[in-house]
Amino acid sequence: MKKITKFVILITLNLFFISNICADNNKIWNFQRLKANFYAFTGLNISTGIVGNNDNELITGATKIGSKAGLRVELNVIGNKHHIETGLDIQNISQSIEYHDVQSSRDFKMILLRIPVTYNYHILKSDKSPFLIFKMGNYISFYPYKRITNNNLLPDYSINNTSRDFVFSFTCFPVNPKWGFSFEGMRSITKLYEDKYHQFAEDKNGGISGFTFGIQYKIK
């Protein structure tokens, strides 16, 4: 219940933050004129996984290329440039953490469900269609599937079922207003994984970070 309350508070703060950014002199939101854009996208995860403790040479982490797909709805709040976006993404992560002091590794396979809340700013072409969209905000991430295997005796660990992540991305529509190329970077602002080498409270990481390159299609 406490986690749900925190998520509700987070969304409320996001919307408050976005509304302040979008405020333009005496203009107010006119919800009767809101225009919705619907997008679908797919992409590849690059270097996405649990962030290692760079101060400790006894461990190293290796990530594998994964996949990501999602559906988004974008609502304009002022003019054609300021938008709020949300939706649902699904993503998979594969990673292996090597523990050199015991000559063993811990392997991770995880599926994530992510709900984004972002502020989007459009740079427009002459025909008012977007050329470049900058996005900034948060993910609320859920981990419905986690498979963690040890190849030998390893230190105890704990792993959460949710995380909050900061996200920054941009999408470019160079020619066709329906097809675009996207880049996204994200990093957790809450702890996901912890063991004796990954201690988030001491800034020894244990969060999630990574990049996604993909293709975005405007459905409507």
Image (cartoon, grey):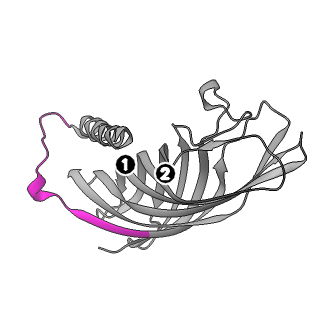
Task: Say left or right for 53 vs 161.
Answer: right
Percent position of residue 141, x then y: 46, 51
Magenta region: which residues?
Answer: 24-40
* Between 47 and 147, the one nearer to me in the picture: 147
> Split into 4 quadrants, where in the image is the N terminus?
top left
Q: Residue at x 51, y 61 (%)?
A: 182
**How many residues crowd mark 1 within 10 Å: few (<14), some (14–19), many (20+)?**
many
Task: Say left or right for 20 vs 114.
Answer: left
User: In what element is the residue under mark 1?
Assistant: strand
Percent position of residue 169, x then y: 49, 51
What residue is disc 2 on? 169
Percent position of residue 30, x then y: 10, 50
Residue 121 lies in the magenta stretch? no
> Split into 4 quadrants, where in the image is the C terminus?
bottom left
The vertical placement of 182 against 167, above or below, is below
User: In what element is the residue under mark 2?
Assistant: strand
The quarter holding residue 91 reads bottom right
